[in-house]
Image (tube, rainbow, N blue to C red):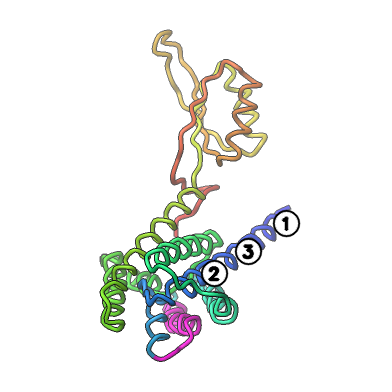
Amino acid sequence: MYEKLLRKQIIKNILFNIAGCFIYALGINSFAAPHNIAPGGASGVAILLNYLFHIPIGFFVFVFNIPLLALILVKNYFSKIFVGKVLISTLLLSLITDLIVARLPVYKGDALLASMFAGALMGMGLALVHLGGSNTGGISLIGIIVQKIRPEFQVGTLISGLNMAIVLASGIIYKNIETMLYAIVVVYISGFIMDRTLANAYMNNLLLIISEKTEKIKEFFLEHHSGVTILKGEGGFSHQEKNVILCVATKHNCVTLQKYIWEIDNQALTIVLDSSKVSGKGFQSVM
């Protein structure tokens, strides 16, 4: 049973990584690069070098990550599994960018529309790769290395500064201030789309159940491998002691649980709250 679930999770991660890399590469190659938009990160540097020296975008992204991953491996900042995942995702992104997406048509219309689509596709692509248990490296690797060396350092400020420097460099290289403004649009939209996608993916429901049949409901939850916590409460009017069931469930499971709660006790009071982040045993882990 465990091996079957593990195999299913691995296949899911692979599909998420392939889809994410393809969507991200599409945003870079088909929308950002044709309009000389360099939206920060290793991809932004790659677009600039492609413009100046015709270096393939995917190839540079891969080369950029190699010394950073080697440093992480040598210094043992993170596990070999982490390094392996990032290496595979970076290689996958590079191959998809240079061998597949580079052959697809590019959008040469309105630059603002191109920047909006580039940001949306890049944000969605990065989110899918993250949901696949990996990331595409780049400037973020510099951030986690600095965080390991200097934990007190403001890594977010460093990454933002590096990205801003790349955006400013694009204005100088292209000799066009509009390309800088479009790059800022891409950065904002990609960050927004990525945050919203991940927030929705990790969204859970918090259930609070007040019932006269607490034991039966608790037994049902435990039989279906749903962890519960029993809170002690008191009726505001009756002053009688009551048990309150606290449970966290995915949105999909929440609907099923509510249905069975009603079948056990149709007088039960069930409160469902959105929980944007749940971490710990059985849920999303914090790196």
Residue 61 shown in magenta: yes
Q: Is residue 164 left or right of residue 222?
A: left
Residue underneath mark 3: 15
Q: Which residues are magenta?
A: 53-75
Amino acid under disc 1: Lys
Q: Quadrant of residue 51?
A: bottom left
CA distance for labels 2 and 1: 26 Å
Disc 1 to disc 3, C-alpha distance:
17 Å
Magenta-highlighted stretch: main secondary structure?
helix
Residue 149 rendering spot, x and y as whole percentages: 32, 73
Q: Amino acid at mark 3?
A: Leu
Question: Which label sits on residue 21?
Answer: 2
Residue in view at x 46 percent, y 33 percent: 273
Callout 2 environment at 10 Å: few (<14), some (14 to 19), or many (20+)? many
Q: Of 69 and 216, which appears nearest the observer?
A: 69
Q: Residue at point 31% right, 66% down?
A: 184
